[in-house]
């Protein structure tokens, strides 16, 4: 008895599965993968010689990318899972729809075939499927695809080269062994370096070149650049460093500090002049008289 019940259950499940089978379908899926095979850092300067107070640099990356395209053919077994609650309305609907569409098909001859055959045949298919309690009607929202097999083939590969800016990368800039700074690049890969801010204090002899370094990060290699300073630029750096040191000397008068700020501006070190003025005001914030004399001297 138990074997008969089990056999009937298996046959019922198989019948439901066959009845609700929709179709076999093939789906084509294309993939593209990009693999960076080489990456080099580039540091671009406006000129081969540093001849201006501020150095504008652009840091970018040259990438060699291998692009592979593949196509996968997926064989799907599509079905609409049987649900008992659907039969509560499908069977009554089928009882009404079957005679209706049979009548429409018979009367189509009287209408000289004006009713589209697709409408009639589709309605009959739907009606008989609804009438069968072992079959749910096909619904596009409930169709489920089960993968049966897949085959993948290579469509081809190519090599692509592209250059893009490096944003937020630390750039190490130095004028000598004791004067250096690390500055991040902006979203466009640019960084602006104030040479006098690097020098800081007077150095004898004045540095002859500025060195720029960007560390590597796999798979990107690092890069370095060394730019010689022009003779005129070296003189301006030495003069600017002396003026800055004089203004920051303890006990320096407000008038002397104002002359130093103006001298830095005249030499082209505008960023350093503003930074010096801010530093002087921060140091002397408790001395209102000194700050008043500084404002008077700067306004003359």
Image: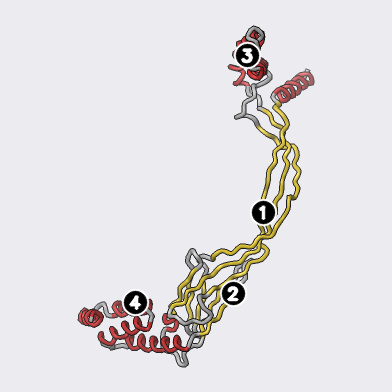
Q: Point out the tag, 2 or 1, that comes first from the N-terminus.
A: 1
Place residue 109 in its image quadrant. Answer: top right
Q: What percent of the width, then of the height, locates residue 149?
A: 75, 39
Q: Residues within 10 Å of mark 3 (few under 14, many from 20)?
A: few
Q: Point out the tag, 3 or 2, that comes first from the N-terminus.
A: 3
| Closest to the observer, 172 or 123 | 123
Quote the CA–CA distance across marks 3 and 1: 54 Å
Q: Nearer the viewer, mark 3 or mark 1?
A: 3
Q: Residues within 10 Å of mark 4 (few under 14, many from 20)?
A: some
On screen, residue 122 above or below 240: above
Q: Nearer the viewer, mark 3 or mark 2?
A: 3
Q: Which residue matches tag 4?
A: 274
Q: Which residue matches tag 2?
A: 223
Q: How many marks?
A: 4
On screen, residue 63 above or below 84: below
Q: Which residue matches tag 3?
A: 114
Q: Is residue 5 left or right of residue 294?
A: right
């Amino acid at each position: 008895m138990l074997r008969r019940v089990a056999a009937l259950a298996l046959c019922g499940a198989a019948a439901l599965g066959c009845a609700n089978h929709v179709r076999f379908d093939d789906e084509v899926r294309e993939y593209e993968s990009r693999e960076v095979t080489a990456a080099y850092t580039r540091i671009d300067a406006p000129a081969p010689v540093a001849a201006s107070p501020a150095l504008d640099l652009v840091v970018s990356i040259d990438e060699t990318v291998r692009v592979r395209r593949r196509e996968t053919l997926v064989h799907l077994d599509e079905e609409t899972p049987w649900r008992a609650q659907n039969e509560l309305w499908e069977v009554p609907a089928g009882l009404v729809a079957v005679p209706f569409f049979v009548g429409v098909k018979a009367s189509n001859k009287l209408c000289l075939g004006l009713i589209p055959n697709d409408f009639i045949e589709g309605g009959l298919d739907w009606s008989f499927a609804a009438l069968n309690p072992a079959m749910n009607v096909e619904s596009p929202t409930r169709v489920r695809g089960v993968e049966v097999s897949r085959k993948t083939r290579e469509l081809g590969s190519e090599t692509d080269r592209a250059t893009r800016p490096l944003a937020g990368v630390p750039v190490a800039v130095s004028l000598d062994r004791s004067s250096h700074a690390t500055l991040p690049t902006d979203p466009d890969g640019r960084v602006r370096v104030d040479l006098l801010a690097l020098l800081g204090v007077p150095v004898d002899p004045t540095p002859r070149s500025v060195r720029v370094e960007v560390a590597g990060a796999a798979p990107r290699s690092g890069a370095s650049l060394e730019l010689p300073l022009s003779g005129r630029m070296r003189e301006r750096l030495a003069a600017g460093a002396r003026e800055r040191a004089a203004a920051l000397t303890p006990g320096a008068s407000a008038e002397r500090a104002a002359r130093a700020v103006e001298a830095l501006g005249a030499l082209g070190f505008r960023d350093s002049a503003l930074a010096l003025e801010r530093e002087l005001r921060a140091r002397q914030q408790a001395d209102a008289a000194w700050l008043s004399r500084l404002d008077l001297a700067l306004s003359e």
